[in-house]
Amino acid sequence: MITYLTGEVVTVSEKRLVLDVNHVGFQIAISSRDAKRMPSEGETVTIYTYMSVREDAISLYGFLSEDDLEIYRKLITVSGIGPKGGLGILSVMDADDVRIAVLSDDEKAIAKAPGIGIKTARKMILELKDKLDLDSVIRRQSEKTDSALENEKAEAVSMMTALGYSASEALRAVRSAKLEEGMNADDILRAALRESI
């Protein structure tokens, strides 16, 4: 099993990365979200990988973060979501978006992924709901930066969920609100509520 690869970016397309690791070129399937964030050709990058072995093919799927890889492994355990389906979901959502959508029963957000319909989204929610928790999402969001603004954003998300918004809607509204350093949770809540109208 290949856990991760560190090497030089040779080429990047919307769905594929060729990575040179000590003069061996690895072709790795990636999400379009990771393709946009990939370093330029010639730069060094670490890719966390999942190896899919079938009768007719051995494929590598890669991610820029271990968190995305962790969620990907959970996604492909759901019947009806294979390696390509899991990659499609992570092309339109990051790992925390997936957690929030599952925990708040937001099947519409999941169904925006290519090849995933409402029926598969419902099955995914049903099968993964007990394996994920929202506290880890909020904790991870505040660990990304220790700024006071991040803590206030987490508080605003909690306040919006208390008002009846789903966790997914609340996080999306807070993320897309126009925020400035020094805002408190109440200010962020007002900005997020304006965003959600």
Image: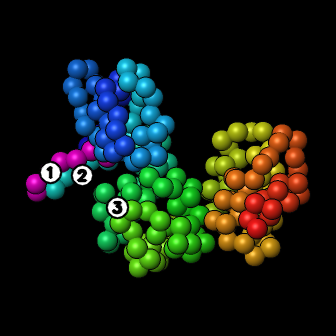
Percent coordinates x, y for residue 119 in the rendering: 41, 79
Mark nearer the N terminus (1 vs 2): 2
Q: Which residue is mark 3?
A: 85
The answer to whether one can see residue 151 in this image is: no
Asked whether residue 56 is drawn in magenta, I would say: yes
Amino acid, disc 1: Ala
Residue 39, above or below 94: above
Q: Label 2, label 3: how many angstroms apart (C-alpha)?
A: 13 Å
Q: Residue at x 66, y 41 (%)?
A: 144
Q: Secondary structure at mark 3?
A: helix
For the residue pair 57 and 37, the one nearer the viewer reads as: 37
Q: Which mark is residue 52?
A: 2
What color scheme is it?
Answer: rainbow
Q: Residue at x 44, y 73 (%)?
A: 121
Q: Quadrant of the C terminus?
A: bottom right
Amino acid, disc 3: Gly
- The segment highlighted magenta reads 55-61
Q: Are the two marked residues, 1 and 2, in contact with CB atoms closer than 8 angstroms?
A: yes
Q: Secondary structure at mark 2?
A: strand
Percent coordinates x, y for residue 120 in the rendering: 39, 75
Q: Residue at x 39, y 62 (%)?
A: 114
Amino acid, disc 2: Ser
Q: Which residue is mark 1?
A: 57
